Image (tube, rainbow, N blue to C red):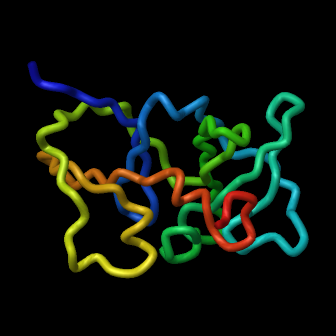
Amino acid sequence: MIKKQQFCTFFIDGFFYGVEVGKVQEVLRPQEMTPVPLAPAVVMGLINLRGQIVPAIDLRRRLGRSERPEGEQPINVVLRTDHGPVSLLVDEVGDVVEVEEGDFERPPETLQGEIRTLIRGAYKRSDRLLLILETENALRFPGSQDAH
């Protein structure tokens, strides 16, 4: 029997990424954010999610991509974590896609530096490459409560 996996997909600076559907709590339109003084640059602020304070992490910055164009509002992909919900700020949300485990490929050896720890691997799709985000590592950065 072929094992399949589902991913919630999104776009960042033209690249196609995914996280496991089971980790996604919800997807929200752009939200008002409260800046956090002295926070790491990847922390864009805090959002109020029905009375719960949720940090918002800009994946463009976390992945070393270019800044979001002026006037473009990010979409919030809220993940469940052991420390409570965290919002990942993305450019656009895609669909939930189902892939076969056998099609998974590890990151190439040529991918170097920190970005290698942020990408678990990829699935070749007929229309584009789906990069799978290593969410635990993406949420661990200098200044974060999870940093080791």
Q: Is residue 8 above or below residue 90?
A: above
- Write down the quadrant of residue 98 in the picture: top left
Q: Quadrant of the C terminus?
A: bottom right
- Write down the quadrant of residue 53 in the picture: top right
Please give the count of numbered marks on the rendered protein.
0
- Could you tell whether 134 is left or right of 54 in the image? left
Report the residue at 51% width, 77% height from top: 66
In x, y percent, where is residue 55? 76, 51
Q: Nearer the viewer, residue 70 or 112?
A: 112
- Write down the quadrant of residue 54 in the picture: top right
In x, y percent, where is residue 109? 21, 75
Report the residue at 33% width, 30% height from top: 6
In x, y percent, where is residue 21? 44, 31
Q: Nearer the viewer, residue 134 or 15?
A: 134
Report the residue at 60% width, 29% height from top: 25
- Could you tell whether 95 is left or right of 140 in the image? left
Report the residue at 42% width, 72% height from top: 115
Q: Quadrant of the N terminus?
A: top left
Q: Residue furthest top?
A: 1
In x, y percent, where is residue 45? 80, 59
